Amino acid sequence: MDKRMTALFHLLQYSDATFPVGTFSFSNGLETASYEKLVHDAPTLEQYARSAARQAAFSDGVAALKAYRSCKAGDYNAIREIDSRLMLFKMNDEARLMLKRMGKKLAELASRIFTSEILRQWLSDIESDLTPGSYPVAQGIVFALSDLGEEDLYVSHQYGVINMILGAALRCVRVSHYDTQEILFRLAAETPDLYDEARDMDFGDMNCFVPEMDILASLHEKGSMRMFMS
């Protein structure tokens, strides 16, 4: 019981919006969607958050699960391969920048908490530009080292994607805290089905086809909206 309680504490710690990996700086495309009036109220925000969650579920989420399993198996080369392949799925620079910055932050933080040769080597390779150091892969490694389950990892991954958008919405969309919490509560019920589908996916099954979000990202790169980095 004590071990599970400690693990649950760590799950809450890693999923906290104030966990210092930089999520507050990104909106996952919401800033442009708001500027273009595509997201302007609670219903359109929920649609956007759901789309982002599904996009991440079958790309970032799959990579996180594979990194978790590879770390548990002590297979560092597999972690490097997952990290590289995930970046091939990112069609815009801001998405790659977001995952790399947050991933490096998490790797640096984790290196102060854990004594792990895999983590030490991975952080060294990030700093040497030998691997991208993506955030989902970092999450997989950290959850494996924390003895948390892969279902815990997937829940935290999905929560992070959705909560990043909802937190940003409070600054750029006309919604209230009540709205965002209701949306979060409803989207939580969809996570088990996403996990059931994602857990058996391999690289060839990964997908993240939501072209509207990539178009919004390209507009943000060239636009003047700079409340967020993406």
Image (cartoon, rainbow, N blue to C red):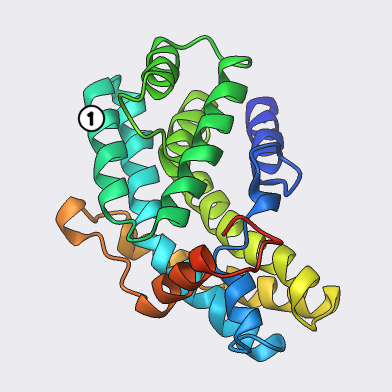
Q: Residue 85, relative to residue 123: is it above or below?
A: below
Q: Is residue 191 left or right of residue 70?
A: right
Asked where in the image residue 204 lies, by quadrant, the reply is: bottom left
Three-letter amino acid code at the position of disc 1:
Ala
| Nearest to the observer: residue 103 or residue 151 | 103
Residue that appears at 64% across and 59% down? 164
Front in this rendered view, residue 195 or 128:
128
How far across and down, in percent of the image, does residue 165 sit? 64, 66
On-image quarter of the C terminus: bottom right
Q: Quadrant of the N terminus?
A: top right
> Can residue 82 be seen here?
yes
Kindly identify the residue that appears in the image at 58 percent across and 31 percent down: 105
* Residue 103 as seen in the image, left or right of residue 87: right
Residue 166, percent across and down?
Answer: 69, 68
Q: From the image, tell me which residue sits under label 1.
A: 78
In-front residue for pair 2/203: 203
Give the class, few, some or many, for how many residues have Cα within 10 Å of label 1's Cα (few <14, many ≥20).
some
- What is the x, y in percent for residue 26? 62, 56
